Each structure stands twice: as structure tokens, then as C-alpha cells.
Amino acid sequence: MILAVKRPKKNYLLKIISLLIIIGISVMYYNDLNKKHEEQIKRDLEAKQLLKIQEEKKEKKEKEKKEAEAAILAEIEKVIDLVGQEYVTNAKIIEDKLIIICQPETNLDALIVRYGAMALIKRTVNEIVIAIDINFILKSRLNAK
């Protein structure tokens, strides 16, 4: 006895459609993951660039601080040379002023010519105190450049 079984064509059609749907979903999921990965790479790149810019700003500020410190030290040397090193007893920086303490017999004419009214001079019996504004020194250095 021979039996003939007929299979419906709808079954093959359903398998092909479901396979295409699964492939379509997989492709969409892959594309979505790709987009998210690209966005993450962009965010990381922007963060690195931001860090680089911040580091450059820090380096620039440190360089400016070093230049300002060198300018102040050079100016201190000039002031001490103008007054005469043997007459200077102490030199300090307090807040934003350069304070130089000298002996009472010191000649301050050269210092007065260089700084004029910007050098505050106080004479006492035991010493002479000279105060020069550091901001004035830095501004004069910036104008010289």
C-alpha cells in the first residue's frame, strides 16, 4: 500500500519569512550596536581632547608663573644692586609687596630715580624700609615685552 502525503506550501513560506525576519532583526541589532560603539568612541575622543586642552592650560599657567617668579627675582637683584648689597640687611616678599630693609646711612637716590613714587620709603632711626609693589614690577615687565 502506497500513501501519498501532501504538504502544504504555506509551511515553507512561513519558514522562509521567519528566517528573513530573524536575519532582519539581527542586522538591525548589529547596526544599533555599531552606532552606540561609534558614539562611545566619539565621547572618549572628546574627553581626551578636553583633558589635553586642560593640561595645555595648566602648562601655560605654570610657565607664566615661572616667568613671573624669574622677573621678580631679577628685579630684586636690580634693587639690591641699586641700593648696594653691603647696605641691605633683609629682603622679603610679603603679600604683593617687595620689602627691603637697609641700614640708615644708605643712599637711595638711584632707587628713587628708577621707581619714583612706586617705591614707598620709610626712614627710622635704626633702619630704612623700602616697599615696592610686585604688580608694578610685573606690569613693567609685560610692557617691556
Image (cartoon, rainbow, N blue to C red):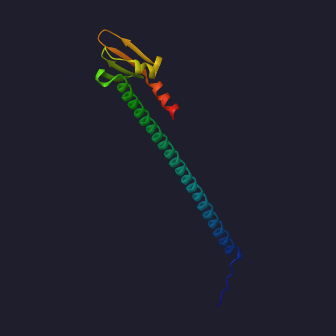
Instruction: Give the residue displayed 33% in from the left and 17% down from the top.
Output: 106
Can you say whether 2 is above or below 74 in the image?
below
Point 52% across, 48% down: residue: 49
- Where does residue 77 sit, x and y in percent of width and height? 36, 29
Task: Please report the residue visible at 33 percent of the width from the left and 9 percent of the height from the top.
Answer: 124
Screen quadrant of the N terminus? bottom right
Outermost residue, right direction?
9
Q: Is 1 placed above or below 121 here? A: below
What is the x, y in percent for residue 55?
47, 43
Q: Left or right: 10 with respect to 79?
A: right
Image check: 139 left or right of 69?
right
Near-viewer residue (130 or 22): 130
- Estimate the x, y position of residue 4 in percent, counting from the top left: 67, 85
Q: Quadrant of residue 125?
A: top left
The image shows residue 24, relative to residue 94, as above or below, that is: below
Displayed quadrant of residue 107: top left
Q: Residue 131 occupies which quadrant of the picture? A: top left
